[in-house]
Image: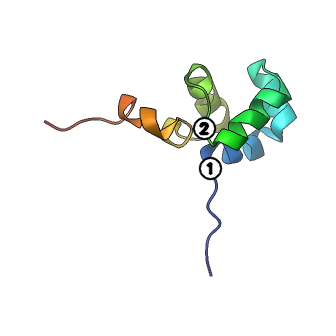
């Protein structure tokens, strides 16, 4: 049996009760949240709040090209 792979934003939407509910809680439009779904990541300005509200780790919400900002480096 294979597991369905979801994005962090998809998990946040489920946790919030839908795109509209997440948008209202963040003070943004549902269209903005829809755009995040299409991109697959949340803008940096909203990541911490989404993480706190929905329990989705910020590493699953951030644009992959910015992942280095939150990943500890060795050395």
- Left or right of residue 67: residue 16: right
Residue of label 2: 41
Q: Is residue 31 above or below residue 61?
A: above
Residue 3 versus residue 43: which sits nearer the camera? 43
Instruction: Write down the quadrant of residue 73 in the picture.
Output: top left
**Residue 32 in the image, given as x and y percentages of width and height:** 77, 27
Apparent side of residue 15 relative to residue 65 in the rendered image (left or right):
right
Name the one closer to the observer, 16 or 9: 9
Per the image, label 1 sits on a secondary structure element best described as loop
Residue at the extreme bottom of the image, as rendered? 1
Q: Residue at x 76, y 32 (%)?
A: 33
Disc 2 crowd rating (10 Å Cα; few below 14, some 14-19, many 20+) is many
Q: Earlier in the sequence, mark 1 or mark 2?
A: 1
Classed neighbour count for the residue bearing mark 1: other residues with Cα under 10 Å, few (<14), some (14–19), many (≥20): few
Judge from the rendering whether residue 63 lies leftward or rightward of residue 29; answer left or right. Answer: left
Res 30 → quadrant: top right
Which residue sits furthest left?
A: 75
x then y, percent, for residue 61:
57, 38
Q: CA distance from mark 1 to mark 2?
A: 8 Å
Quadrant of the frame with the C terminus: top left
Q: Which mark is residue 71?
A: none
Tag 2, which secondary structure?
loop
User: What scheme was used to colour the molecule?
Assistant: rainbow
**Quadrant for the N terminus in the image:** bottom right
Q: Quadrant of residue 26?
A: top right
Contact (Cβ within 8 Å) of mark 1 with mark 2: yes
Residue receiving disc 1: 7
- Please report the residue visible at 68 percent of the width from the left and 47 percent of the height from the top: 11
Q: Residue 69 placed where, x, y %?
A: 38, 28
């Amino acid at each position: 049996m294979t597991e369905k792979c979801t994005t962090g934003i998809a998990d946040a939407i489920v946790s919030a009760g839908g795109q509209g509910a997440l948008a209202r809680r963040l003070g943004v439009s549902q269209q903005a949240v829809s755009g995040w779904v299409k991109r697959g990541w949340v803008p940096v300005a909203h990541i911490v709040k989404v993480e706190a509200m929905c329990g989705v780790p910020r590493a699953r919400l951030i644009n992959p090209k910015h992942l280095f900002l939150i990943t500890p480096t060795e050395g």
